[in-house]
Amino acid sequence: MNKNVVLSGVQPTGDLHLGNYLGAIKNFAVMQNENDSLFCVVDLHAITVFQDPKELRNNTYEVIAAYLACGINHQKSTIFNQSQVSGHAELAWILNCICRMGWLNRMTQFKEKSGKNSENVSSGLFTYPTLMAADILLYKATHVPVGSDQKQHLELTRDIAQKFNNDYNSPNFFPLPEPFIEKEISRVMSLRDGNSKMSKSDVSEYSRINLKDDADTILKKIKKSKTADTNMPASMEEINLMPEVNNLLNIFSGVTDKTKNELIMYYEGQNFSNFKKDLSDALIEKITPIGNEIKKLMSDRDNLNQIMAEGVAKARIKSEIVLNEIYDIVGFVKQ
């Protein structure tokens, strides 16, 4: 039986945080055991907004180190940086010619990121979803671990794949990829505002837990995190009215084997100081070993270069097979 093909990626745009881990990388390590898995550093996506070249290069290594530190095995999975596999950009152009402007105009994330300044943002930011579609379809991926904020882009990928199949009379050439969303923790929110996503771009360091934070820093950030002017409620209905409390419960559940309902039952009626102390302990136990391993791996660039080179070689072989098929279907002359 053929394995499912799983593909996902992380942008190298700064310190990785708890949202990256719980919303994405944690799932990667589990999925690699049962699937043909490809995990890339999406550096082409990163430059839709200007990046300092030195920082971009360093951040690329750091994402590779984080993958490894979080349990992704480079012998089981294909780990690589996107820009080194030219098929991503080549297929993106073909899919730009398949995708309709109206489809891209409906993408809510572009509207959120561009705001009132849409005339001045890069065209790359506008066509970002077709590059994401190329990332996925280049390997005929069947499943894509995504956060809820990327689900619309995956739906667009399915539309593009279906249109390609129809336009070129190639039924089922591209599979229609399915999202894999960890419903409880697919979107980790800010520690300061339960209605805003945890983000590396937030000016406040106290809004997020970075994967390289030490124990004292984690303790301080959780202690200062926003909760509610009450004791722990007894039901999910009440919790749903308290976004910051709900977020902390999601995080607690994500770094332990406990469900949210189990946590609510245990802490029901208690003030939040005990809850925060236990949450801090759980985070320190889970996150600090990852941070220490990232730092250790970052000290050996030769090793990281070797792992990336191996991953790039495997990705190129896989992608070239599919790209040659696409070129033949489209009608390009090959020598």
Image (tube, rainbow, N blue to C red):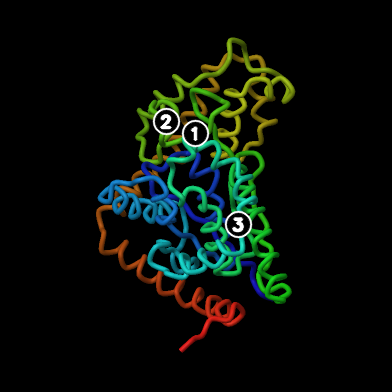
User: Is residue 310 rendered to the left or right of residue 77?
Assistant: left
Find disc 1 in the rendering and name its residue.
Answer: 198
Whole-angstrom CA distance, mark 1 to mark 2, is 8 Å
Q: Residues within 10 Å of mark 1 (few under 14, many from 20)?
A: many
Q: Residues within 10 Å of mark 3 (few under 14, many from 20)?
A: many
Which mark sits nearer the N-terminus, 1 or 3?
3
Q: Is residue 192 above or below residue 70?
A: above
Q: Quadrant of the N terminus?
A: bottom right
Find disc 2 in the rendering and name its residue.
Answer: 202
User: Is residue 223 rendered to the left or right of residue 181?
Assistant: left
Residue 219: percent from left, percent from top: 41, 26
Which mark sits nearer the N-terminus, 3 or 2?
3
Does the residue at mark 1 contact the one at mark 2 (Cβ under 8 Å)? yes
- Given residues 113 and 64, the one toward you in this image is 113
Does the residue at mark 3 contact the one at mark 2 (Cβ under 8 Å)? no
SS at circle 3: strand
Residue 286: percent from left, percent from top: 46, 41
Whole-angstrom CA distance, mark 1 to mark 3, is 21 Å
Q: Quadrant of residue 106?
A: top right
Q: Is residue 149 above or below residue 298?
A: above
- At x 30%, y 54%, the residue is 57
- At x 61%, y 64%, the residue is 98
- Given residues 145 and 268, the one toward you in this image is 145
Q: Amino acid at mark 2?
A: Asp
Q: Is residue 193 above or below residue 228?
A: below
Whole-angstrom CA distance, mark 3 to mark 2, is 27 Å
Find disc 3 in the rendering and name its residue.
Answer: 144
Q: Amino acid at mark 1?
A: Met
Does the residue at mark 1 contact the one at mark 3 (Cβ under 8 Å)? no
Q: Amino acid at mark 3?
A: Val
SS at circle 2: loop
- At x 31%, y 54%, the residue is 297
